[in-house]
Image: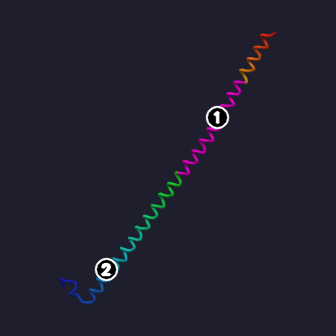
């Protein structure tokens, strides 16, 4: 039997079943590939959302720290100014005695 067509109906049925099986496997592969691409796209979207949340949280934390430090600087400058004023007043009082 050089040609599978010479094998008769049984050979043709086997060939048909093999082709159907191959087609089924191809469809499963294509569906799996589509699903994989969709999941990869979802993953990229989630990564971007997480990155945006991290950036936002860092900005908020930094703004809070900046505000706190500015408050401490203003407070320290006020304390220095008050100390200089007291020193000046004490010097003036000592001179007037």
2 over 31 or under it: above or below: below
Q: Position of residue 86 (x, y in %)?
A: 75, 20
Of circles 1 and 2, the one toward us is 1
State the residue position of label 2. 19
Q: Position of residue 92 (x, y in %)?
A: 77, 14
Mainly helix, strand or loop, the magenta region?
Answer: helix
Quarter of the C terminus within the rendering: top right
* 76 relative position to 49: left or right: right
Furthest toward the bottom, the residue is 9
11 over 30 or under it: above or below: below
Residue name at image x 30 percent, y 83 percent: 16
Asked which secondary structure carries label 1, the reply is: helix
Q: In the image, is residue 72 part of the stretch drawn in magenta?
A: yes
Counting residues from the start of the chain, the first of labels 1 and 2 encountered is: 2
* 88 relative position to 65: left or right: right
Q: In the image, which residues are magenta?
A: 52-81
- Which numbered circle lies on residue 70? 1
Quarter of the N terminus within the rendering: bottom left
What is the spatial separation of the Cα atoms under label 1 and label 2, in whole angstroms?
76 Å
* 66 relative position to 37: left or right: right
């Amino acid at each position: 039997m050089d040609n599978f067509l010479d094998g008769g109906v049984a050979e043709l049925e086997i060939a048909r079943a093999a082709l159907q099986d191959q087609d089924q496997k191809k469809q499963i592969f294509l569906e799996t590939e589509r699903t994989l691409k969709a999941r990869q796209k979802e993953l990229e979207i989630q990564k971007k959302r997480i990155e945006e949340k991290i950036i936002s949280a860092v900005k908020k934390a930094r703004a809070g720290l900046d505000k706190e430090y500015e408050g401490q600087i203003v407070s320290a400058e006020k304390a220095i100014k008050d100390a200089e004023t007291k020193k000046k007043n004490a010097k003036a009082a000592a001179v007037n005695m």
